Amino acid sequence: MNSLLEVRHLGKSFGKGNNKVQVLKDINFTINKSGLTALRGRSGSGKTTLLNLIGTLDKPTEGDIYFQNKQISQFTEKQSSEIRRLHMGIIFQSYGLVPLLTVEENIEFGLRITNVPRAEWKKRIDESIHLVGLAKRRNHRPFELSGGEQQRVAIARAIAPKPPLILADEPTAELDSNRAFRIINVFQELTEKDNMTILMTTHDPEILEMLDNVYALEDGQLADEKKENHA
């Protein structure tokens, strides 16, 4: 089997009774290893909720999620934490950087909680900083960086451990077109050279044109899948 991630009849609702809001309805898709896939959709379409469920940060109301052939959607908090720590990299819209740590130290902090040998840390830090184009900012702290630079630090921290799966919520939202294209090229390189699998959300039409695999979310449901053209 070449699939890394499988989502079956996934649903998520919040509230009860008359206050119940169905955010996701009967979501089904499979993502193969070593690929870059995008979820597109308007704000409020359920993209972030879906990423949070796949990242075991929340539990579905119904349905199942299989990751590396394990049913992870009902994992305990300890199991969820372990799988995120060792097998996933998550890039949040809020960046999630440690304020008092430099760019280097933030990336090292991400490596500390993984099983990457300490002897490899410096090489991984240098590689990831180079990939996101922050070599000249490596000793700066988050408050000394622009929003786009902070976003690139968050990306570097997630890719440094080279996890099997990266979940990226609008990873290019704060970047200009050139930087955004560079990050997508980095993602494509990671899938090809390091066999990483990346699932990202975006609503940027120029980014979507660069990708072969795009799922559309509309009103909590999967609307279509792009293989050639998403227009």
Image (spheres, rainbow, N blue to C red):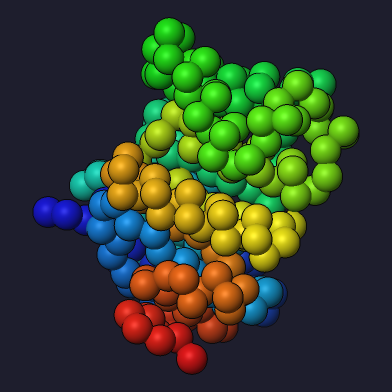
Q: Nearer the viewer, residue 209 or 101?
A: 209
- Residue 136, horizontal then vertical, whole percent: 73, 30
On the picture, is 211 further left or further right than 220?
left
Question: Residue drawn at (48%, 91%), measured in percent from left and top?
Answer: 231
Image coordinates for residue 39, horizontal then vertical, percent: 49, 69
Name the outermost residue toward the right.
143
Q: How many marks?
A: 0
Q: Is residue 106 left or right of residue 130?
A: right
Residue 142 at x, y = what percent? 81, 33
Left or right position of 60 against 178: left
Is there any visible trace of residue 198 in the rendered image?
Answer: no
Say left or right for 71 vs 96.
left
Q: Is 39 placed above or below 157 here?
A: below
Quadrant hosting residue 101: top right
Name which residue lies at 66% across and 30% down: 135
Residue 109 visible in rendering: yes
Q: Nearer the viewer, residue 122 or 51?
A: 122
Q: Residue furthest left?
A: 1
Which residue is outermost to the top?
119
Front position in the image: 94 or 73: 94
The N terminus lies in which quarter of the figure? bottom left
**Residue in view at x 32 percent, y 40 percent:** 194
Decide: is 141 above or below 10.
Answer: above
Residue 99, percent across and down? 81, 27
Q: Residue at x 57, y 61 (%)?
A: 181
